[in-house]
Image (cartoon, rainbow, N blue to C red):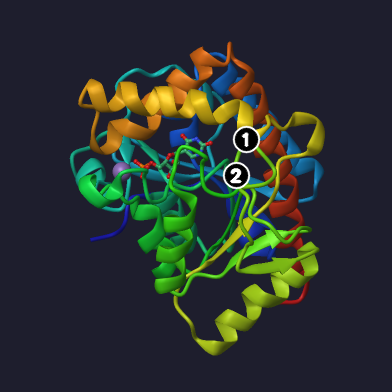
């Protein structure tokens, strides 16, 4: 069968001309942010990628077709839709085969990016090992994906709702390079410092692009996680967030929230408990990641 894959016109053109492209996920639009900030953010992320000299490729499943780059009002339709599935590696084929609509997680976005020949992807924060995973076994499929799909993912670290030390342990086991940008410590999504050292550090886009190319030359499967700290003016101190995260966590547990619903539930509760300031920080860090991802994509394409 032929794969129902559609490239947007600007992505098709950039692919043909060897231009720099940055993949963008859509779960953050449908399950990570409330309307209308989700649409505004998706648009400003695309604009940021363009002004940094690359082409944005927002990825989603629409009526069973895998779209790499959305046209016209597709972004708005997605941002307003209520019936969109959260699609990870396990769900992608079923969603497409049944003609459904799906928002891609980090894992599914990496799969689509690789199919389209895109090397770099920007998001907010990846999924990881949840707190209490020793009893729930809740570990995001994003980690396995980083181990097997060769895409460099720029995020502000793993979301602070996760168990960051355990997430780093699993990434080490899976052979995924975790590269902190411009500082020794890991960032923690809304905060710049997770209080523990990152496994690796690099200070600019050219160095990260060189490491990406070297992995390809070595024939290593899997991608890189680039942990880009939130800009100083936008950060929320880890101490301020810790009790709020703990409360959201306790509520999730008490209400029996499990599996795919955990991350969206926690993000929504933290948004409410911080009177929206978590969202302001989230938007700032996504834009910051889009800028860096565009620079890395340009470096990778410039050196063939
Ligand atoms: N980053 C954000 N907001 C989000 C997500 C990431 O700033 O909503 C999404 C991503 O799509 C990520 C997913 O892949 O959350 C992780 O979900 P889970 O923990 O269920 O694997
Ligand atoms: Mn999970």
Residue at 52 percent across and 48 percent down: it is 158
Q: Distance between the residues labelled 2 and 1?
A: 8 Å
* Residue 170 rendering spot, x and y as whole percentages: 40, 64
User: Which is more toward the observer, 268 or 296?
Assistant: 268
Residue at 56 percent across and 14 percent down: it is 36
Residue at 49 percent across and 22 percent down: it is 270
Q: Residue 258 carries which label?
A: none
Q: Is residue 18 above or below residue 90?
A: below
Asked whether disc 2 touches disc 1, contact meaning CB atoms under 8 Å apart, the reply is: yes
* Residue 242 rendering spot, x and y as whole percentages: 53, 31
Of mark 2 and mark 1, the one earlier in the sequence is 2
Please state which of the two labelled residues, at mark 2 or mark 1, is closer to the viewer: 1
Q: In this view, does 241 lie to the left or right of 301?
A: left
Name the residue beneath numbered marker 2.
188
Q: In which quarter of the image is the N terminus?
A: bottom left
Residue at 50 percent across and 86 percent down: it is 219
Q: Quadrant of residue 167?
A: bottom left
Q: Is label 2 in a helix, a strand or a loop?
A: loop
Name the residue beneath numbered marker 1.
238
Q: Quadrant of the C terminus?
A: bottom right
């Amino acid at each position: 069968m032929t794969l129902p894959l559609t490239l947007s016109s600007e992505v098709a053109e950039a692919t043909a001309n060897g231009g720099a492209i940055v993949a963008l996920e859509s779960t953050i639009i449908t399950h990570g942010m409330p309307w209308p900030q989700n649409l505004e953010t998706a648009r400003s992320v695309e604009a940021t990628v363009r002004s940094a000299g690359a082409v944005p490729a927002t990825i989603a499943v629409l009526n069973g077709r895998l779209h790499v780059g959305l046209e016209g009002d597709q972004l708005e339709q997605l941002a307003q839709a209520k019936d969109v599935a959260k699609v990870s590696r396990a769900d992608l084929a079923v969603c497409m085969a049944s003609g459904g609509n799906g928002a891609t997680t980090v894992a599914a976005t990496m799969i689509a990016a690789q199919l389209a020949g895109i090397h770099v992807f920007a998001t907010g924060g990846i999924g990881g090992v949840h707190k209490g995973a020793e009893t729930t076994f809740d570990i995001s499929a994003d980690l396995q994906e980083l181990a097997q799909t060769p895409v460099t993912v720029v995020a502000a670290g793993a979301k602070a709702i996760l168990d960051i030390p355990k997430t780093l342990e699993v990434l080490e086991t899976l052979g995924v390079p975790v590269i902190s940008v411009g500082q020794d410590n890991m960032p923690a999504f809304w905060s710049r410092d997770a209080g523990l050292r990152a496994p690796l550090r690099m200070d600019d886009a050219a160095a990260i692009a060189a490491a990406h190319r070297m992995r390809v030359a070595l024939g290593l499967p899997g991608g890189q996680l680039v942990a880009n700290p939130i800009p100083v003016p936008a950060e929320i101190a880890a101490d301020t967030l810790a009790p709020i995260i703990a409360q959201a966590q306790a509520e999730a547990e008490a209400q029996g929230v499990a599996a795919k619903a955990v991350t969206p539930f926690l993000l929504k509760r933290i948004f409410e408990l911080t009177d929206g300031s978590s969202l302001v920080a989230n938007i700032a860090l996504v834009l910051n990641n889009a800028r860096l991802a565009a620079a890395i994509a340009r470096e990778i394409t410039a050196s063939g």
